[in-house]
Each structure stands twice: as structure tokens, then as C-alpha cells.
Amino acid sequence: MARPRKCRRVCCLPKADAFVPAGWGEKALPVVVMTVDEYETIRLIDHEGFSQEQCSVYMNVARTTVQQIYNSARKKLSIALVDGLPFKIQGGDYQLCDGGESHCGCGGCHKHRKSCHAVIASNKEEQS
């Protein structure tokens, strides 16, 4: 029996969930589908500058799992870009951050960014 998949913690859904190449029109092209958790690894590692280890802690999965998700996401991005295919972000095994934690510990979550900085500032004041 296979082990059940863990839900990956995701900060927020993407602002835009579909992209089409210029001049696409209504051609019947296959659509490349990236999952929300794949999008989150691209956002955290490539956009926010996290290491795979930091990303794994944030998403609450093993580093090897993050590496697999990240490799899959990069492959899908390259297919869409090189072949000029429409691209969609949807689905996957994820749980949206609800902002319920006192802070995220990494500063990567938009819902926690202000509280993270407040915790860091208060810790610095206490040490002074």
C-alpha cells in the first residue's frame, strides 16, 4: 500500500493562472498544466531565493520531494516556452496558508510578512 500524499503548504494562489503565447488565437493546441504546488516551488526558489531546504521546511515536505516537484515544474515551463504552448496553473496536493500561525519563520508568506518582521524587531529590542 502506498503512503498517502502530504498536502504541501502554499502561501497563496497565483495572480494569473493561465498564459497563452502571442498570436495563439483559438488554435487547438495542447495546454501544459502546472499544479499549484509546482508553482509554489518556482515562486519560492526562483523568485524569493529560497534554497530547496528552506522551501521544504516552508512547504512542510521533505527536501527530496521539493526537488522532484521543482524539476517537474521546470520541465513543464520549458515545454510551454520552447514549444509555444498555452500554460495553466491548477490542481495539485496543497493546503493554502490560513495565516493561523504566529509567524511563518521564513518571511516568504505574504500573510505573515508583517508579523515576521514584527517578531524579529521585538526579539532585537529584547536583546538590547
Image (tube, rainbow, N blue to C red):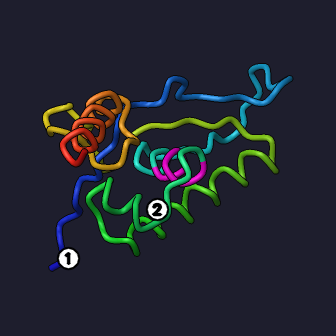
Residue 18 quadrant: top right
* Residue most extreme to the front: 128
Q: If you read the primary sequence from the N terminus, does the residue marked by circle 1 or circle 2 appear first?
A: 1
* Residue most extreme to the bottom: 1
Q: In the structure shown, which secondary structural element does the residue marked by tag 1 occupy?
A: loop
Q: In the structure shown, which secondary structural element does the residue marked by tag 2 occupy?
A: helix
* Residue most extreme to the right: 23
Position of 13 compared to 88: left or right? left
Position of 39 compared to 120: left or right? right
Quarter of the image that includes the N terminus: bottom left
Work out whether residue 126 or residue 94 is closer to the camera in this orientation and state it.
Answer: 126
Residue 63 among those drawn in magenta: no
- Rounded to the nearest angstrom, the CA distance separating label 1 from label 2 is 18 Å
x and y percent of residue 84 in the render? Answer: 80, 41
**Numbered tag placed on residue 26 in the rendering:** none
Tag 2: Cα neighbours inside 10 Å, few (<14), some, or many (≥20)? some
x and y percent of residue 54 in the render? Answer: 40, 61
Quarter of the image that includes the C terminus: top left
Residue at (22, 36) in percent of width and height: 122
Reading the image, the residue beneath label 1 is 2
Residue at (73, 40) in percent of width and height: 85
Residue at (36, 62) in percent of width and height: 56
x and y percent of residue 9 in the render? Answer: 28, 47
Region rendered in magenta: 41-46
Reading the image, the residue beneath label 2 is 69
Residue 44 among those drawn in magenta: yes
Residue at (35, 49) in percent of width and height: 106
Q: Is residue 5 above or below residue 118?
A: below
Position of 7 compared to 56: left or right? left
Amino acid type, residue under disc 2 in the picture: Ile
